[in-house]
């Protein structure tokens, strides 16, 4: 903050506090023609409803003075007057860092002990999975839901269908390094009819009702455009995050309209990397929890 704005904030803050003090003093000072305390003021309503001069009790008034003194003491101890940091030198960042260091000192040894075991073993440890579940709820549930059931565009982690692989090492890599899945748009290359034909062929791969004639035409286009990622049999490629199209499990939806949209417009999915943020030990434990869901 520049010196000008720092000075401006300081002046405005102190001026407001002084103005509050002046207002209290002015409002509590009796006027020359004011009625004595307890007497009527001469104001009447509805014929016989009279106003009495009954000021607030003194202890109430002193509460206002106390708040003024408190505010001045606070502004001496803590930041609040522009660039002035306060005599205690407190800051939000400093308090956050202290809490983080305290948490690390308390919990890092626990995570380090868990990290000595392999993921498959930890997945069978009830205490480990309970801690892993808390990590999941804090960092993963926003996208994958609290029960790991996922949502449209966010994979279900509680089933046995995995875009990038569901083995222990693959799950750990996904959490640590993140993933980027990209389905390019094919509308320009296939045309409207081509998109509809490929849609019918994709629907046929999972054994659902489809237009056989359109699916036959779509297979030829699928073999030219799609096998590089999804394979000749449509079962996908975990190395690329290309989904299996034969299992009737759909990330964005399996209706003909949604599949058509996916083929025509493409999709992009991003799983952010958590390795630097969580640290290796927490990633290891979180991987064990998700791996335990896979085995269920």
Image (cartoon, rainbow, N blue to C red):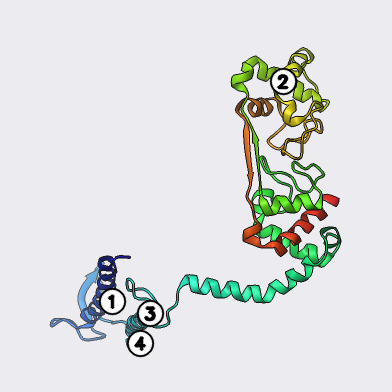
CB of mark 4 within 8 Å of CB of mark 1?
no
Crowding at dot 1, Cα within 10 Å, few <14 / some 14-19 / many 20+, comes out as some
Front label number (3 vs 1): 3
In the displayed structure image, the side of residue 45 where residue 158 appears, left or right: right
* Figure quadrant of residue 3: bottom left
Q: Secondary structure at mark 1?
A: helix
Numbered badge on residue 224: 2
- Location of residue 282 (image quadrant): bottom right
The one of 74 and 68 positioned closer to us in this rendering: 74
Label 4, label 1: how far apart the Cα atoms are:
20 Å
Mark 3 or mark 4, which is nearer to you?
3
> In the rendered image, which residue does mark 3 sit on?
86
Mark 1 lies on residue: 17
Is 246 located above or below residue 109 in the figure?
above
Q: Secondary structure at mark 2?
A: helix
Q: Of the residues under marks 2 and 3, which one precedes in the sequence?
A: 3
Measure the C-alpha gap from mark 3 to mark 4.
Answer: 30 Å
Q: Position of residue 104 (x, y in %)?
A: 64, 73
According to the picture, the residue beneath numbered tag 4 turns out to be: 59
Where's residue 199, x and y in %? 71, 22
């Amino acid at each position: 903050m520049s010196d000008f704005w720092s000075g401006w904030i300081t002046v405005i803050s102190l001026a407001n506090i002084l103005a509050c003090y002046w207002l209290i003093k002015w409002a509590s000072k009796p006027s020359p023609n004011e009625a004595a305390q307890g007497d009527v003021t001469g104001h009447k309503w509805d014929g016989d409803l009279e106003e009495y001069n009954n000021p607030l009790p003194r202890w109430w008034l002193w509460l206002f003075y106390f708040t003024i003194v408190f505010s001045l003491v606070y502004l001496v101890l803590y930041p609040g007057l522009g660039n002035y940091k306060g005599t205690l030198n407190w800051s939000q960042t400093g308090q956050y860092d202290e809490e983080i260091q305290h948490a690390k000192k308390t919990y890092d040894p626990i995570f380090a002990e868990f990290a000595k075991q392999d993921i498959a073993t930890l997945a069978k440890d009830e205490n480990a999975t309970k801690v892993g579940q808390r990590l999941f709820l804090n960092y993963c549930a926003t996208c994958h839901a609290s029960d790991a059931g996922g949502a449209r565009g966010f994979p279900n982690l509680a089933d046995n269908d995995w875009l990038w692989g569901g083995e222990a090492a693959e799950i750990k890599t996904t959490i640590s390094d993140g993933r980027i899945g990209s389905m390019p748009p094919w509308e320009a290359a296939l045309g409207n009819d081509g998109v509809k034909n490929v849609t019918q062929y994709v629907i046929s791969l999972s054994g659902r009702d489809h237009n056989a004639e359109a699916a036959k035409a779509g297979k030829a286009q699928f073999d030219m455009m799609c096998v590089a990622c999804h394979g000749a049999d449509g079962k996908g490629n975990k190395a690329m995050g290309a989904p299996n199209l034969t299992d009737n499990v759909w990330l964005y939806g399996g209706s003909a309209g949604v599949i058509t949209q996916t083929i025509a417009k493409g999709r992009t999915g991003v799983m952010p990397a958590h390795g630097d943020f969580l640290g290796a030990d927490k990633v290891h434990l979180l991987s064990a929890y998700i791996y335990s869901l896979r085995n269920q």
